[in-house]
Image (spheres, rainbow, N blue to C red):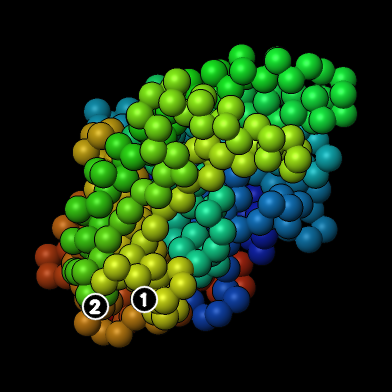
Amino acid sequence: MIVTTLRLRDFRTYSRARVALGTGLTVVHGPNGAGKTNLLEALYFGCTARSCRTANEREMVRFEAQATRVEVGTADAEGRTHTLSVGFQPGQPKRMWVDGAMVERLVEAPARPLVSVFLPDRLELVKGPPALRRAHLDQVVAAARPARAATRRAYAQSLAQRNALLARVRAGRAPRAALPAWDAELARHGVALRADRASVVAELAEPFARAADELGLRGAAELAFRARSEAATAQELAAELAERVDADLERGFTGHGPHRDDLALRRDGRELRAYGSRGEQRLGLLALLLAEREVLGAARGASPLLLLDDVMSELDPDRRGALAARLARDGGQSVVTATDLAHVPQPAGVDATCLAVHDGTVLTQAATAQEAA
């Protein structure tokens, strides 16, 4: 599934816009503040019904406008076309359509392409708290194995129930004897969730190390899953929960289990989170996204749409060339923003669609980088 067109109405700095994407690389170029990142956000919003930049979706609505609407045109491998639409008005429920029919969730629509995004702010995925990496890892699990997405939801529901029961026991409104049943339920889903995460990390490990090496990350790159519990069975995890129940009652919540797992990105055995420079963290994040793209492409039969914002500005010419060559070799669809078109190398024999933007307006569109130049 590829994205063919993007239509915007009252999105960020754009009053109206329509752009056509290439089947391979699309370069969006223009000065700072021109609206390049807004186009990437609109693509992400149109494919997921979520913003990749803000939790306050009011910010997406153009000043003085009442609502925004994003429409994404897609085409499948057989050439069948589809349309995804998302409308948002502050204070009103978000509305989503697939081929004109209203839906409750876009993520389950077969016409929706998978999408991955790099933004400078996403370095928090490397250097931020474990909760960000857990959530990201669970998204990869759900994308690679859609049938397993329910496991995380079931675990979250069981964890909430056990925490609520701990609060009632602590307040004397429920008997302590009620806890073992929820220990067993939480452990059952927890062992399954940990197995899903560990399996996906194992698949990502070799592509991650290879991508990091291609991008010039010095040293041996390693991706490691750090499970909070090593229990081999649900019964063993339930026993671990029972052993810690006094501490849980004291603190008022469950302190042990897969909700404390983490994902470690390492170079020469040291975590990039604590010991990597900003440039090394940037390369680590890029390597992770490229590894995920490779694994998801193999699992789903098509590479995700990759959105890369301002990725070239902090890379030297050699690493820019390595990244461009990797994008071309992957054969998937990518959209890259840059202040200068020359910052995005074009591998020999590869055409790129180029979009010039300025002040929230798409000025020009060319079929190849050579024509744009």
> Could you tell me how far apart the alpha carbons at marks 1 and 2 are, in whole angstroms?
8 Å
The amino acid at mark 2 is Arg
Q: Is residue 182 left or right of residue 116?
A: right
The percent coordinates of residue 217 (x first, y second) are 26, 74
Work out whether residue 334 can be spotted: no
Work out whether residue 179 can be spotted: yes
The percent coordinates of residue 317 (x first, y second) are 26, 84
Nearer the N terminus, badge 1 or badge 2? 2
| Vertical comparison of 141 with 99: above or below | below
Q: Secondary structure at mark 2?
A: loop
Residue at numbered disc 1: 280
Most foreground residue, 302 or 32: 302
Most foreground residue, 271 or 84: 271
Circles 1, 2 touching at the beta carbon (< 8 Å): yes
Most foreground residue, 214 or 341: 214
Residue at numbered disc 2: 218
Most foreground residue, 354 or 173: 173
The amino acid at mark 1 is Glu
The percent coordinates of residue 126 (x first, y second) are 46, 63
| Vertical comparison of 107 with 150: above or below | below
